[in-house]
Amino acid sequence: MVLHVNKLKRVAVLIESTRGYSRELIRGVAQFNREQSRWRIEYTPGSIRDLPSQWLKEWNGDGILARIETKPMLNALLRKKVPVIDLRRSFSHPDIPSIGPDDRCVIQMLFEHFRRAGFTRFAFVSTVRNYHAAMDLRRDTCRELVHANKLTFSDIEIEPPDSGGDKVRMMKKLSGWLKRLAYRTAVIACTDDFALQVLNGCRLIERNVPNDIAVAGIGNDDCLCELALPTLTSVDLAPKKIGYNAAELLQKMMDENYVPPKTILFQPSMIVSRMSTDTIATEDVVVSEALRFIHVNVCGGVQVKDVLRHVHLSRVALENRFKKAIGHTIFQEILDVRLRKVRELLTTTDLPFKTVAFQTGFDYPEYLMRLFREKYGQTMKVFRKNHGMK
């Protein structure tokens, strides 16, 4: 009897190892390969601007996963005549599908995060336009949301921190812009790197973070976020999941000549709240105190009547002030905080759903599961499968 053994596919992984997001992409690819054992991966650690030109020129393989940073790199990959998937989205090409986070959803999450804290003034820090399409989309989405809600918006374009430009001039420009922002402004940076520059700028002009200006980044690079002073709130983009799915897609392209959609987007995992946004922005001190009370006690089963008793106001009076300050009711705030805690537990633990319900103030797990499905359009089981620990 002849034993037929599938030949291992030669796959080049051109993903930098210098950032947390990219390392998590690589971990996702590695997990796929451990489970399938069908690839011989060829990988050289480097930065985003490193192009292994000679190595790639001589390489003869079956597929490529890449973070395409430059036009020369794009052209070099096209010449290989093998399936390629792009995980950076700096360039668009009809023959190369791209995969990454849903940037509109990312900004929607951050906008809601700040609105729940009472912010009415928003600002955005981004790259110069046309440097990176995803960064442009993040800024434009933020502007649209702010204007749609008739709130205040400001933005600034600066050179990427690692671009090699004049850092002193860049910081002077950023600091001058920050100084002109009104107090209690929520600043969203297009990446964690940019958010660190914002924090540096705030220190230079002696603006307190988060009380004067609250700051959030995107990417949740834990090294950057934890080293920041204060520690940086950021959106976890679920890069390990993206890397895993990119590898799964490449396998299908190599095996079946599958033609995937031009762009595939994944919802971010969650906002990881840290000290840079740990504040309540509303100038209504009663609403501010009510919000603090809710956030501290929500998992203990706090109800609207408890909030009213704490601030010594009637329901009608407090509801009117709540709607004016943050745009929704007391009950909705309690529910939203509980559901965010549910998402956090589903993402970071393997607790049974019944335990998750009780730990977040829900007396009936069945009610929570129905509510979760109505709110997020998927069951808790599906959410945990997509966003939870692997």
Image (spheres, rainbow, N blue to C red):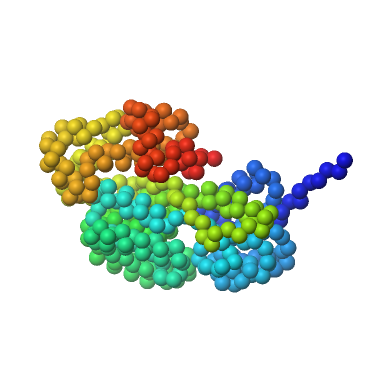
In the image, residue 180 above or below residue 184? below
Quadrant housing residue 137:
bottom left
Q: Is residue 67 visible?
A: no
Task: Give percent across and percent down for residue 89.
Answer: 51, 63
The picture places residue 52, in percent across and down from the top left corner, at 65, 65
Q: Which residue is painted at 73% across and 63% down in the image?
A: 60
Taking depth in this image into account, of 371 and 384 the one nearest to the observer is 371
Q: In the drawing, does residue 247 fall left or right of residue 338?
A: right
Q: Which of these two is toward me, 78 or 127?
A: 78
The picture places residue 309, in percent across and down from the top left corner, at 15, 32
Camera sees residue 150: yes
Residue at 27 percent of width and 60 percent of height: 148
Q: Which residue is at the front of the view, 225 or 206?
A: 225
Residue at image position (33%, 30%) is 362
At horizontal 46% and vertical 31% (from top left) the residue drawn is: 351
Is 138 displayed left or right of 86 in the figure?
left
Side of 107 relative to 65 (left or right):
left
Q: How many numbered discs?
A: 0
The quadrant of the image that shows the N terminus is: top right
Q: Furthest residue to the right?
A: 1
Quadrant the C terminus occupies: top right
Picture coordinates of residue 72, whole percent (x, y): 59, 72
Asked whether, in this view, residue 324 is left or right of residue 61, the answer is left
Instruction: Establish if 128 lies above or below 62.
Output: below
Vertical arrangement, residue 130 with respect to residue 272, above or below:
below
